[in-house]
Amino acid sequence: MKIYFEQIKSDGLKFDTNFDFEYIDAHIVVKNFTGEIYPIKKGYFLDGIVTFTIEDKCDRCRDLVEKEFSERIQLEIVRNKLEENSEEEIELKDEDLSFYNVLGDFIDVDEIIKEEVMLLKPMKWLCNEDCKGICPGCGVDLNYEDCKCSDTFIDPRLEILKKLKK
Ligand SMILES: [Zn+2]
Ligand SMILES: [Zn+2]
């Protein structure tokens, strides 16, 4: 979806858009964005809610987990004319806000949403905060089974102790 700057009136532009793009590598599917864009002093402000799903393997147990997200996106959009000095940095006052630099006549909403959603993926991906994961010794999924290590695995340090005792 493209929004041309001339479409944005002084009281802003509300929009609701459905997406069907997905990130093949990250297993993210973006579904919808509902929000508005309005002019501010430095440029424009985009504010809205994006919904997306992530399907990925749990970092601990490797089970496939799908979760749906609904997150707010807020960012400043600065329109830069091509002839402007590109090395000139625009200072941000509020550290919580990110900003997006646009060259040209329109804002590529899809592009912005794609980039923002990538940043929203949690660093840790767990089926459950309490996921016990897979035992590195015996390989059982500790969420479903008890560790079998004690039966088969003998710590080499204990072996040495046994020998010393003899
Ligand atoms: Zn898990
Ligand atoms: Zn084990």
Image (cartoon, helix red, strand yellow):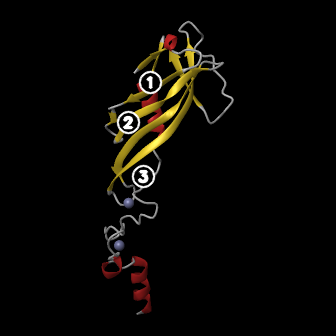
User: Could you say where residue 6 lies in the image, as x and y percent from the top left?
Assistant: 51, 10
Task: Determine whether, in the image, residue 47 is placed left or right of residue 28.
Answer: right
Query: From what the image shows, is residue 83 above or below residue 14?
Result: above
Q: CA distance from mark 2 to mark 1?
A: 13 Å
Residue ID for mark 1: 109
Comes first in the chain, label 1 or label 3: 1
User: Closer to the N terminus: mark 2 or mark 1?
Assistant: 2
Say which residue appears at 51% left-offset and 13% top-offset.
5
For badge 1, the amino acid type reads: Val
Tell me, yes or no, if residue 1 can be seen here: yes
Query: In this orientation, which residue lies closer to the viewer: 63 or 20?
Result: 20
| Label 2 secondary element | strand
SS for callout 3: loop
x then y, percent, for residue 14: 50, 24
* Residue 151 drawn above or below residue 79: below
Residue to which mark 3 is pinned: 125
